[in-house]
Image (cartoon, grey):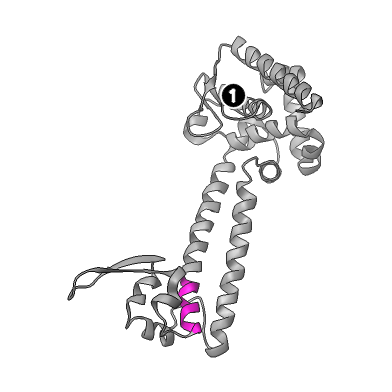
Amino acid sequence: MNPADTALNTDNETIFKEMVDYVRSLGVTVNTTTKARGHQGFFLKNRIDISSNISTERKIEVLIHEFTHYIHAQIDSDITKNHGQLEKLFPDSDFARLEKELFEVTKQFDKNKGFRLLQEKRASILLEIKDCSAKIKNKYPDFKRSEPYKKIEKLIRKTDAKYLLKYDRVRVKNSFFGGTKDYSISTLALDFPQFDEETREYLLLKSKQRMLKRVSSRINRLNNYYKRPTELFARFVEALFVDTNKVTQIAPYAYLVFCKELTNDRFLELAEFINKFF
């Protein structure tokens, strides 16, 4: 190991220990030897858990995040019910602008890269859907992917491939002779050699459309989670520790409002915490 890396790890361990000691001095229970229920860390009532399975550097960031949840809970006691309100944190502010900037910070500093990976996946699926549609249109110019295309489906519904119009994999039981047969979107050419390219592309298109729906649903759920005021606030403070300059560029208004309220002691012990460790 590089001596510089060793020194950095030692510094991080010292910082993390000092942060934990400070939070505990406020009467908060901090557990650092568990896997942290569900994620890398969590806050519940007067307890913070930090996963023991992550790097010390990440432990610092997670502790900052969860400690910010603790501070938010002192300001707005209903965050466990309604995820808090920006109005309680930043009164008399432009909340639409605040939410937009805070959300942009969340996307830029997302450690799990959830947004980017899902957006990239969605973009890739859309290209594949476009490619399937183009191949079908070569033979059927009147084809529209937004509605069932009867000219192709009529042929498909005469075979067991009809199940693949709704599912990617199926096991079909033979009512007369017994036994079962497995079919899959990934083995269309083998399972249904009688189909031409356009028919196979149509079934593949249906599969891609189902996949797009699932990915879009995950994106929506993630957006709804990350847009909760309590998450926006915690990720903003965490991001300030990681790279303050970048945050001020992404969210100049949010940063100014935050600094004003921090100076006015709205965020309680968070001001002292930032002065000590940021």
Question: 10 Å neighbourhood of mark 1: few (<14), some, or many (≥20)?
Answer: some
Magenta residue span: 197-206
Residue 264 can be seen, yes or no: no
Residue 93: quadrant of the picture: top right
- Would you place residue 242 above or below residue 18 in this image? below
Question: Is residue 112 shown left or right of residue 8?
Answer: left
* Amino acid at pointer 1: Ile
The residue at the point 34 percent across, 72 percent down is 163
Dot 1 corresponds to which residue? 75
| Residue 205 in the image, given as x and y percentages of width and height | 50, 73
Q: Quadrant of the C terminus?
A: top right
The residue at the point 58 percent across, 34 percent down is 230
Residue 130: quadrant of the picture: bottom right
Q: Nearer the viewer, residue 57 or 149?
A: 57
Q: Nearer the viewer, residue 26 or 123?
A: 123
| Residue 122 in the image, given as x and y percentages of width and height | 59, 60
